[in-house]
Amino acid sequence: MIKCFCNHTHTDHAFSVIRNDISYTYNRCSNCKTYRMIDSPKLEEIIKHYNSEKNARLSPEFKAGRSRTVTED
């Protein structure tokens, strides 16, 4: 049984997300309508994700694209 943060016990499968070949499932509480990740990623997966995102944002291509977006608006 999966309990929501509001202590309600009825949640329904809402959707799944696949990232790096790993599926993450989200349920929605029938009482308060909030979504909750059921199978949270491991700490190593979280660190790997944020490190890859940080590296992507530091790349020259990302910075150049961001500069164009700011100046074109």
Image (cartoon, rainbow, N blue to C red):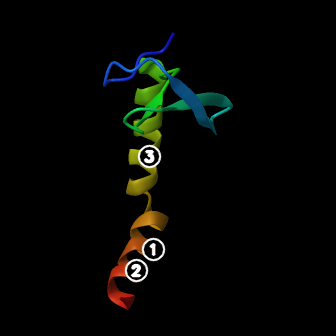
Using a 10 Å C-alpha cutoff, classify the residue at mark 1 as few (fewer than 14 neighbours), some (14 to 19) or many (20 or more): few
Up/down of 61 relative to 49, above or below: below
Up/down of 56 relative to 18, above or below: below
Up/down of 63 relative to 31, above or below: below
Q: Which residue is mark 2?
A: 69
* Residue under the point 53% across and 20% down: 39
Residue 34 lies, in percent from the top left, at 40, 37
Q: Which residue is mark 3?
A: 53
**Which callout, 1 or 3, points at the residue further toward the start of the chain?**
3
Label of residue 17 in the image: none
**Which callout, 3 or 2, points at the residue further toward the start of the chain?**
3
Instruction: Give the amino acid at mark 2.
Output: Thr
* Residue under the point 39% across and 21% down: 8
Asked if disc 1 and disc 2 are in contact, CB closer than 8 Å, the reply is: yes
Q: Which residue is mark 1?
A: 65
* Residue under the point 47% across and 18% down: 42
**CA separation, marks 1 and 2?**
6 Å
